[in-house]
Amino acid sequence: MLCLFLTACDGSSWNSAQVYRNLRIWRDAVQQMEAELETLPEARVVAQAHQRLGFHGRSGNPAWIMLDLGRFVMPEEILLLSARVSDPAPDDPVGGFPPVVRCSLSATGIEDSFWFVAGYREEYEGAGSDLPLLSLHYQGKPGRYLRIEVEGGRARSHGQFFTLGEIIVLENGINRALGAEVTTSPSIENAPRWTASNLTDGYLWCGSLTGLQKSPLNGFHSAIETTPEAVPKWVEVDLGDTFPLDEIRLVPARPPDYADIAGFGFPPSFQVIASAGENDEGQVLFEGVLPNPGDATVCLPGHGVSARRVRVKATSLWQRSQDYVFALAELQVMSQGLNAAIGKPVRASDVATSSKWSLPALVDGFSSRRELIGWSDWVHAVKRRRWLESALASARPHLIVLERGFHESLLWNGVGVIVSLFLLGALSLSGVHLHQQRERARLRQRIAQDLHDEMGSQLSHLALLAETGQRSSGDSLAAIANEARDLQHTLRDLVWLLEPHNADPRDFAARLRITCRRLLAPMIPDVQIDSSGEPPPARLPLEWTRDLLLFVKEALSNCARHSQATSARLCMNWTDKTFEWQLMDDGIGFDETASEFEPGAGLRNLRLRATALHAVYSLVSKPGEGTQIRLQVPLPRPRRYFAFNRS
């Protein structure tokens, strides 16, 4: 009769409650994603006064780009950065990231000598056109030549095209593609904006790799001159020891307390000189004229030169208004994946010191605006931000629909809810009472069974030990104390199972590790616990948690009491669909097929628990060769709610 009534009322109040639950879940998820987004640096397009935007390729079958890295490199990650324009003209390409990419390496560069490294294909047409970067991981043998093949392109009025801004080949955190020689299939050349050499020049559309922390200082500032002839001016960092130089990074200043000027004080022409000692004239790593880089970090190869001192010498000064200066926000000297210049002594030909400008500020790890971070942190932030922005773009409209549906449900079903509550009151009282009686009966049965299995035998053992203790020495008292402690832990486990937070998979995983240590460590000297994978995001049902915990405790107790092992190893592995638990010991073992073997309650309980979990269970043991227990449990089906990656 209750079902007929609900059908007649069209379930209005129940539908409203479900809509509200869905609305709350989605609202919480959106708020969490928005909060995480605030913790990630925004990789935005900055002023690109240098005009070196990237490479503009024509589609081919396939089109290709090849880099000569100059030496054998073991790349850990290959990054393909898109080309982003800060001041787009009407004919500038927009959204030109290629739809299909294949990367391969070669030792010689000869045709047919390349081996496949990694690839990418967009999920559907146009999905990857605005991709900010593509990260391809690699584990294999080293190579010298990197070949990138592109299939397809993006449509324009006069044909198909694709664009790339920069190619990064990371080895130990260093870009080994910096300054590499580039050859390509036919392209559209429009120097300096679009040319093949831009792919390895170190200029990025985001300027510098920065985080969120604000900079306390602006950087280094030379004395102010009234004429441009007051050169040269120089600034130098002493690394304290000799380092092989992989890369020199010059970060232009953009002081927030001045007029907003990108590339403030960057010298139009300069030299970078590396020297091994005080009296060493040094080796010139760079000498020439560069257009003002704006916000872009100037990256120069170190060519593996070993040096203790790195000097930047301005051979011409930057004109501010009616005067001339030389300024830099940061000087980074990359060696073996680390910035060897951070916090090291700095000296200069002259310096204008103030509250914001100083010599130590040149090596403090900050640009004039933000902290400087490494490639891996920056790539993770960009990819995570893109994922969150994509998820929010889908979640926010759905949240609006849910809110609208909830309000309409309240409006149209309000009267129905009131009437339903009134009429259902009498019917639900008896139904709820019957349901509660059944639930209490089930709960009593489960708790009684657990108390009987887990605690009954221990209480009986305590009684026996107490009787023995009346006639023997204090050893029985120690045994009673041990049994009491075991009983205490058993009671705590039962209480823990009834607490609401035990459904959190992370808490349950931690509980399993604690239980393993507690039961094995007192009896077995060498206990190793290995864990892999991540617990699922969905909450775990109480019955599933209870059966698995009791299986684990039974197996561990059997091992501790009977195996006589000196070492034991536990392996826990979480996957998307299963949880696998293994226990291996080097104890005395046993033979289940032997005529004299009498299986105890422990082995029967293991099989019963495994059956209740619908798990794959195996036990392998031989006399003198230890015992191995393996349990593979399918994870319970998650509740339907919005969940996203914790990382």
Image (cartoon, rainbow, N blue to C red):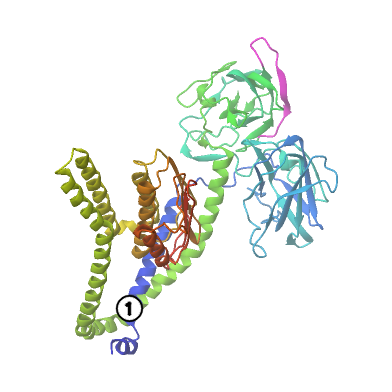
What percent of the width, then of the height, locates residue 99? 70, 58
In the picture provided, is 359 more to the left or to the right than 130?
left
User: Which span of residues is magenta-colored?
Assistant: 276-292
Label 1 crowd (10 A; few <14 / some 14-19 / many >=20): few
The answer to whether 120 is drawn above or below residue 526 in the figure is: below
The answer to whether 315 is drawn above or below residue 599 in the figure is: above
What percent of the width, then of the height, locates residue 638? 43, 65
Task: Please name whichever residue, 399 or 580, is drawn nearer the observer in this view of the structure.
Answer: 580
The residue sitting at the front extreme is: 595
* Residue 56 in sight from this viewpoint: yes
Q: Which residue is mark 1?
A: 14
In the rendered image, residue 278 lying in the magenta stretch gets the answer: yes
Residue found at x 44% / y 61%: 643
Residue found at x 72% / y 21%: 284
What percent of the width, then of the height, locates residue 594? 46, 57
The residue sitting at the left extreme is: 470
The answer to whether 643 is drawn above or below residue 240 in the figure is: below
Q: Tag 1, which secondary structure? A: helix
Residue 176, located in which quarter of the rendered image?
A: top right
